[in-house]
Image (cartoon, helix red, strand yellow):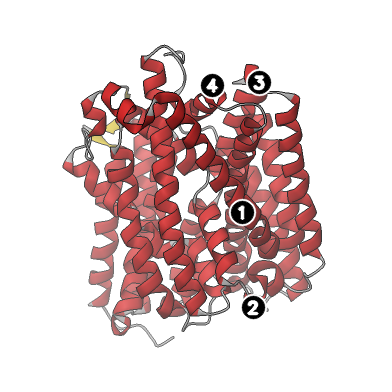
Amino acid sequence: MAEHWTGIDSAILAAYMLGMLGIGVIAMRRISAFEDWFMAGRGLTTPILVATLVSTYYGLDVTFGSSETAFEEGVSAFFAYSAPFYLAYAACALLVAPRLRKIPARTLPEAVAHFYGPSAGRAAAFASFFYSAPILSVAGMGLIGHAVFGWDPLLAAAGGAAIALVYTLMGGLLADALTDTVQFAIMCLSASVAAAFALHALGGWEGLSERLDPSLLRPGGDLHVSDLLVYGLVAMSPLIEPAFYQRIFAGVGIRAVRNALLIGLVIWAAYDWIMVFLGLVGRDMVATGQLDAGLDSSSILLHVCGELLPTGVLGLFVAGLFASAMSTVDSYTLIAAGNLVYDGVQPLRKQPLSDRALLHWTRVAAAVTLAVSLLLALRFDRLRDAWIFMATVLISTVMVPMTVALFAPRRARPRAGAAAAWTGFACAMGLFLCFEIFGVYDPEEETRLLLGAPREWALLASLPASALAFVAASFGRPAEAR
């Protein structure tokens, strides 16, 4: 891709980066308390919520992950991996959000603690931190820097993360939401333009589908029923998504939140399909000799657009990729930092931190979070693997207790919630550790196997373990009222 990059493209990318920093400076002038920095004063309206929800939740894990999976497996990347999420988005908008707005909370762990007490809240804070640390987007920025400029991936990741950290430290959620609005526009525009150029160059969808192997066009692909079950369970993560919860609590009202989620659902589906389409384009270009067959599938999107997009448009597209990454880095860094300080440290203190100290230490935790993310960014072979690990930890810890609390609140006993949360967390982390230590990588299955089972199946054990722990603790001695 580097051979197609010009000075005009560099100027466009530089203007984008400087613009993000400028928004951070503007937002900083409106920050006077922790509530302003962490919750944007609870005044996010529908248009801003749409932009920040879409751009935050769709980072480079989706952008690169969907195109990579489509390149390897075909349209199942949309129908098996992405489509199940849309039901969860709708359920979050219509069922979860109205119930959440009735409780006094700022974060997912605080919501868990509200129903089950501090022990369950701490388990949720740990799980939310692992889920929210922006490992995937940091790794994605490394891929972009390496493909475009030939930089070392770690250096490129550190540079992009540093810019996102600066404006997040300055303006918090307000800067995050405002930059997300700009990033949302760039993401959608650049993705649409790339798809249009690809359609024109390859003779439309009909021409592309005629050249592709028919197996790539089967909605279920070659996935086993167990794989489909795992991905269906992972798709429930929006029901307990930390970024969604923060936006739900920060919205100006429940109507604004509901409308934003439903509008976002349509945009998410369109963005998903464009990324899957571009992954299939990459498969076709490799088959026809337009791209080298030895290219890494995780960066196939970059090579497709490098070949098809003209000067200037290519710069806009790469800016859109950075927008996709940075909109996720800033939001999830903010959430993970809050998990450490607001949800983790503060409940353990006899005297709550002052507002000034809370703001200071959460900013420090944001820097620590990004440093940890950089260390873990290159650990996973495929972005999909990292996503499954993160989602498994969160779902195993929080799904059972929060589902009961929201839809059967009379069953929400503190002892049961704590048992379910800690059992799910320990089981998920323990299983993944066993796969890392004792598992063997199978190149055909493209995953690690332990006793013949792929590590993606960890959720099939850890989520039931959490549910059983909840049921068992429910029949024990009733805990004292909160």
- Residue on which the image places disc 1: 333
The image quadrant of residue 345 is bottom right
Q: Secondary structure at mark 3?
A: loop
Q: Secondary structure at mark 1?
A: helix
Mark nearest the camera among 2 and 1 is: 1
The label on residue 350 is 2
The label on residue 150 is 3
- Residue on which the image places disc 4: 307
Mark nearest the camera among 3 and 4 is: 4
Three-letter amino acid code at the position of disc 4: Glu
In three-dimensional space, the C-alpha distance between marks 3 and 4, rounded to whole angstroms, equals 17 Å
Residue drawn 29% across and 54% down? 233
Q: Secondary structure at mark 4?
A: helix
Judge from the rendering whether residue 32 lies leftward or rightward of residue 385; answer left or right: right
In three-dimensional space, the C-alpha distance between marks 2 and 4, rounded to whole angstroms, equals 60 Å
Three-letter amino acid code at the position of disc 3: Gly
Mark 2 or mark 3, which is nearer the start of the sequence?
3
On the image, the x and y values in percent for residue 343 come to 57, 67
